[in-house]
């Protein structure tokens, strides 16, 4: 019988995620699976907490990877922190802000949103107006909007949100390990990420961190968390409790991969890693200039790891992306929602963020266009 895996070749992943995976991370996944209560595994779990705290800029004890992709991290934050009829404000400027609204509405929250034009950052005055008008229990924002390539200005936004009593939730799926995050200094109460972006792991885990204030809210809920699998009050007993009480079987080999990816980033030096992302973004810009290609987002608000490139008039989005994949083994992303057919999304995340990869894409695009 034909084994379908035989047809899988290495593709250069230059889209919005997953990003390419390093040989060290691949080989970590192939290590022997051990038990989820094996003392050696528990040592790895404890090490991951410290590694994640370093990248997230926090001392939060409850800092763990949730089993599931970035969306599981998003649900974890909201199912644990929201109760029915609570007032929630979502600062929405793309697909993932819109997903937050959907998740919170499903939980029976009263959801208000600021809906900024895609490709533009959230403006402080918009937030000020909302928080002057109403008291919110929770306010959430996407740090790096992967659907548009926009970086929301967290320093200023955090200051403003910290003038309220609302719990502050941040999506750091694309920003973690690509941009500095100061969870404690920004007064963030819950933050989630994903493994397949700047951490350059295969998808499957979602690092999450909860502040003391978030834990207090969780422990004093009127009603049980409405989702068993993502109930952090139980999961925390396994990840950080003294008893290591079984909740669900940890995805052992994915946890190895996360450990190895974080280990490599910390060895490289987190500041060097941020600088590398910025340098590769700037190098890509030089190359795009040579092809007369422009970015969607204004300079000040551009993400280094995700570049939304305007598709020139008369050029077929699908034809170019199919040709890149079929003839050059390079994957880039298309636009989502309102931006479908209008932009390409080129990711320079983690292990993908290399000069030789930018050169390879440039040379392919030069031939195709
Ligand atoms: N949030 C952001 C900013 C994302 O970019 C993504 C995925 O691309 C998600 C959330 C959802 O993550 P996942 O697709 O891993 O569930």
Image: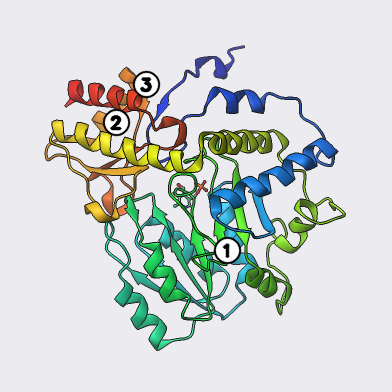
**Which mark identifies residue 321?**
2
Question: Sequence order check: which comes first, mark 1 or mark 2?
Answer: 1
Q: Residues within 10 Å of mark 1 (few under 14, many from 20)?
A: many
Cβ(mark 1) to ligand 1 < 8 Å? no
Q: Tell me the element at label 1.
A: strand
Please name which of the two marks, 3 or 1, marks the residue nearer to the observer. Answer: 1
Please state if 97 lies on the left or on the right of 313 as rendered: right
Residue identifier under label 1: 190
The picture places residue 53, in percent across and down from the top left corner, at: 61, 52
The picture places residue 138, in percent across and down from the top left corner, at: 52, 74
Up/down of 132 relative to 278, above or below: below
Q: Tell me the element at label 3.
A: loop
Q: CA distance from mark 1 to mark 2?
A: 36 Å
The picture places residue 180, in percent across and down from the top left corner, at: 45, 51
**Do tag 1 and tag 2 residues touch (Cβ < 8 Å)?**
no
Question: Sequence order check: which comes first, mark 3 or mark 2?
Answer: 2
Give the colouring mode of the picture.
rainbow
Cβ(mark 3) to ligand 1 < 8 Å? no
Residue identifier under label 3: 329
Please name which of the two marks, 1 or 2, marks the residue nearer to the observer. Answer: 1
Name the quarter where the C terminus is drawn: top left
Q: CA distance from mark 3 to mark 2?
A: 10 Å
Q: Which residue lies at the image location 57% right of the left edge and 46% below the top edge?
A: 69
């Amino acid at each position: 019988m034909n084994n379908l895996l035989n047809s899988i070749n290495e593709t250069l992943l230059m889209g919005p995620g997953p990003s390419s995976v390093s040989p060290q991370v691949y080989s970590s996944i192939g290590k022997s699976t051990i038990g989820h209560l094996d003392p050696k595994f528990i040592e790895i779990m404890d090490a991951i907490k410290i590694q994640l705290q370093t990248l997230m800029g926090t001392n939060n004890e409850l800092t763990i990877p949730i089993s599931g992709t970035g969306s599981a991290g998003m649900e974890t934050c909201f199912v644990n922190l929201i109760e029915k009829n609570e007032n929630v404000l979502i600062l929405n400027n793309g697909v993932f802000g819109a997903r937050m609204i959907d998740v919170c509405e499903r939980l029976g929250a009263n959801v208000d949103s600021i809906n900024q034009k895609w490709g533009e950052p959230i403006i402080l005055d918009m937030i000020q107006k909302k928080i002057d008008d109403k008291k919110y229990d929770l306010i959430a924002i996407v740090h790096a909007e992967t659907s548009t390539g926009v970086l929301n200005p967290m320093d200023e936004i955090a200051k403003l949100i910290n003038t309220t009593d609302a719990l502050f939730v941040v999506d750091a799926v694309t920003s973690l390990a690509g941009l500095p995050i100061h969870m404690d200094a920004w007064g963030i109460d819950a933050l989630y990420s994903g493994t397949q972006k700047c951490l350059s792991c295969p998808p499957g885990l979602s690092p999450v961190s909860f502040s003391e204030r978030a834990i207090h809210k969780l422990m004093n809920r009127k009603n049980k968390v409405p989702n068993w699998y993502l109930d952090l009050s139980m999961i925390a007993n396994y990840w950080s409790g003294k008893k290591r009480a079984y909740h669900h079987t940890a995805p052992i080999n994915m946890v190895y991969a996360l450990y190895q990816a974080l280990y490599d980033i910390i060895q490289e030096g987190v500041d060097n890693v941020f600088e590398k992302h910025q340098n590769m973004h700037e190098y890509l810009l030089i190359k795009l200039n040579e092809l007369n290609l422009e970015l969607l987002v204004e300079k000040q608000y551009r993400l280094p790891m995700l570049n939304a490139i305007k598709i020139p008039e008369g050029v077929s989005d699908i034809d170019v992306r199919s040709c890149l994949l079929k003839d050059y083994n390079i994957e880039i992303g298309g636009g989502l929602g309102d931006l479908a057919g209008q932009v390409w999304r080129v990711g320079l995340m983690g292990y993908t963020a290399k000069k030789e990869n930018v050169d390879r894409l440039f040379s392919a695009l030069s031939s195709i266009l």
